[in-house]
Amino acid sequence: MSGAATRSKGRRGQQQFAELLRSLDWSVAELNSGSAAEDFIAVSPAGVAYAVEVKNCASIMTAHRQQAMRQAQARKLPWMLASKIAGTASWLVQRQGDRPVCWSAGEY
């Protein structure tokens, strides 16, 4: 996959996950794409802000979690990593201090 196609796929994943968060009453602040920072900041209905990294790829890797943790530390926020589960409308969501969970559009 070319660099442009990879970026486009990544951006689609970011938009899909941001839409899922909004449907769950989260607030989402989009950041500049293509930077070496998190994909966006999201604030839970309880008011907790997270530095969010979204991965729209076939594999879920430890390196992705490490990336999310580094970026959140730089932002001084807790981290969230959302990994698309290939072939589904579901996401594996890992958050600092919480157990991993599976979120799917339309299930709430």
Image: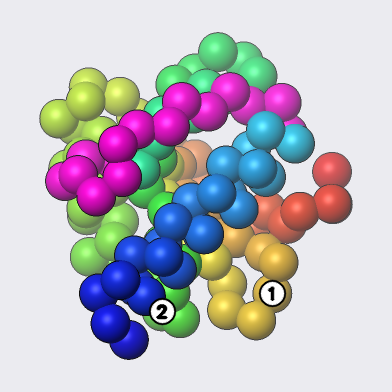
Given the current orientation, which residue lies at the most extreme bottom position?
1
- What's under tag 1, amino acid-wise? Thr
Q: CA distance from mark 1 to mark 2?
A: 13 Å
Mark 1 and mark 2 lie on one chain; the one further toward the N terminus is 2
Q: Nearer the viewer, residue 86 or 60?
A: 86
Q: Nearer the viewer, residue 64 or 34?
A: 34
Range of magenta residues: 24-38
- Label 1 belongs to which residue? 88
Image location (x, y in percent) of residue 85: 57, 72
Instruction: Say if the magenta span includes residue 106.
Output: no
Q: In the visual, does 92 lie left or right of 67? A: right
Q: Residue 4: give its label.
A: none
- Kindly indicate the quadrant of the structure image that contains residue 86: bottom right
Q: In the visual, does 14 lie left or right of 16? A: left
Given the current orientation, which residue lies at the most extreme front position?
4
Q: In the visual, does 82 lie left or right of 52? A: right
Mark 2 secondary-structure assignment: loop
- Kindly indicate the quadrant of the structure image that contains residue 102: bottom right
Instruction: Say if the magenta span includes residue 32.
Output: yes
- What's under tag 2, amino acid-wise? Ser
Given the current orientation, which residue lies at the most extreme right position?
107
Residue 96 visible: no
Badge 2 crowding class, 10 Å Cα cut-off, few under 14, some 14 to 19, many 20 or more, is: few
Magenta: main secondary structure equals loop
Residue, x 30% and y 24% (percent of image)? 77
Q: In the visual, does 92 lie left or right of 35? A: right
Image location (x, y in percent) of residue 19: 65, 43
Mark 1 secondary-structure assignment: loop
- Label 2 belongs to which residue? 59
Residue, x 31% and y 45% (percent of image)? 33
Residue 66 visible: yes
Quadrant of the image containing the N terminus: bottom left
